[in-house]
Structures are given as C-alpha cells and as structure tokens.
Image (cartoon, rainbow, N blue to C red):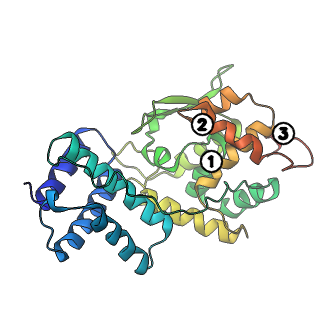
Amino acid sequence: MIPVHEAHGKFVDHLKNQGRSSATVLAYGKDIEQLGDFLNELNKNRVSEINLKDLQAFMAKLSKEGYTPKSISRKTNSTKTFFRFLKINDFITDDPATLLEHPKFEMKPPRILSKTEYRALRDAARADTRMSAIIELLLQTGIRIGELARLKITDVKFSTGSKTGELHVPAGESYPDRTVPLNKAGETALKRYLEIRPATRDDTLFVTKTGRPLLVRNIRTAIDRYFKLAGIRDAKVNDLRHTFVAHHLMAGTSLVLVSKLAGHKRLATTEKYLNLIQGRLEEPVKLEEL
C-alpha cells in the first residue's frame, strides 16, 4: 500500500537509473507530481486506491484549465509510464491506466523552408556571428537542437587537404552517436564564430558571453527572433531539421543515407518525407546553391 508521493519518488529514481535525459526526468516528474496533487484532492493517497475514472477526471480537469490536446497527450503518456512502472514492480495488482485514451488531435505536417526562406533566415542572422553559426549548422547538418547544445569543440573536425570536414554528434537518450559531413558553408560559419568565442575553460562549443554553455531554451528563443526578422511565419526550430531532410531528398540523396545523417532510428521515419516533398518545388534542389 505504497503512498502516491513515495511512488512518485521511486519513479523519478527509476527514470534516472535508466539513463533518461534530465529534461525527460523533469517533465515526467512534474506530470506525476501534478497528478499526485489532483489525487490528493480526491483523498486518493495510495496508488492501490486509484482507478481509471480518477485518471480520466484528471485529464478532463486539464482540458477545462486550457491545456492543449497535445499537452494532455504528453501527460497521458507520463501517466501510463508511471503506472506501468508500478505494475512491473508489484506496487499495484491492476494497471488503471491501460485503458486511458490519448486525446485526438491533428498533427501538422513538418514545415519545410523554401529556398527563399532558407536564404532569408541566413541573411537575417548574418550580423550575429554566434547565431549565424548555429543556424548554419542546423541547416547544413540536420542535427537536433539538443544535440547542438551538447556539442564540444572537439566534436568539430575541419577539412584538411582532400579530407572533408566532419561533425561528431554524441549519442543521446535514444539514438547512437554518428558523424555527419561538415560542408563549406558550415565550416565558414563555425570558423568565424570560433574567432570571437569567449575564452572559457568550458569546452562546450556554443557558449554565452560569460563563457557558460548556451541552453536549448536560449537557442530556441534567438532563432524564433530571427524567423520574425526574416519574415518567416509559422516556423519552429525543428523545421530547420525537417528542411535538411526534405532538401536532401529533393536533391537526390539516397533515402538510406539521409536517414543515417539525420540519426533516424527507423527508415520509415525518413520515408514519411517522400509524400511531403511531392510537388514542393518546380525544379530539383541543388544543395550547393542554397
């Protein structure tokens, strides 16, 4: 008859022991904490007392409070994961979250920047050497924003002689490390940035003016600002990654290679872009012209 608050603590420890990212642990932890607060209002203080109707009531309350279906779906996933943990560890005999349904919502297709938008974004950030390098790297390598924030100086290998430049992308929570080519545009932007990068003992590639690692939320905010300056509407940071994948496929790069460069776990993830790019441009994309 374990109390909800104690189960919550054990669940967070379990996630940490699994090697989940700090962001994932924090998000799941807060979701279950919020659920625990709601259950406390119902005087359901032990996990064995919770039933499906309690969980459905929690999700309904979130909806009334203005949470989006996408946010509620994420909290539903957290709840299901929490109760699976309880069931596997014999803290409960029946899992009430098994029949808990995700809310229905329409997933918008990835936003692919046109060639004009692609160039406009680069032009908008050109005077900001650090952000110009960040945007260029996201566009030219297709790495995730979290991967970019974790890059070290030693992950960058500039071209020498006949050997092309490379970027080592360290392994993340659910994907292995990989190496992606670093083209001339990416190299040029990075070299310009490294010339003005603040002196610091921290070997994180992108740092603040005081030499501390640049956080994902700061990178996201800055890129959103440059989207506005460039006149690009309804775009998000992840759309730079979508653009990388789509433009490579439109340029004729093989599906298998694009999947490998993007770090997709399944080829099917990359294949989804094929329908998206049909009829996108009047003429094939030439990567060297972007």
Residue occupying image coordinates x 92% and y 48%: 282
At which x and y percent is residue 32? 26, 61
- Say which amino acid is labelled 3: Lys
Cβ–Cβ below 8 Å for labels 2 and 3? no
Residue occupying image coordinates x 50% and y 59%: 219
- Say which amino acid is labelled 1: Arg
* Secondary element at tag 2: helix
Residue occupying image coordinates x 32% and y 49%: 81
Q: In the image shown, does 180 or 161 lie closer to the viewer? A: 180
Measure the alpha-carbon separation of dots 2 and 3. 19 Å
Relative horizontal placement of residue 210, taking residue 105 as reference (left or right): left
Res 92 label:
none
At which x and y percent is residue 127? 65, 62
Residue at image mark 3: 286
Q: In the image shown, does 181 or 49 lie closer to the viewer? A: 49
Query: In terms of sequence position, does the residue under pointer 3 or pointer 1 come before the other?
Result: 1
Residue at image mark 1: 241
- Assess disc 2: are there few (<14), some (14-19) or many (≥20) residues with their C-alpha within 10 Å of its C-alpha: many
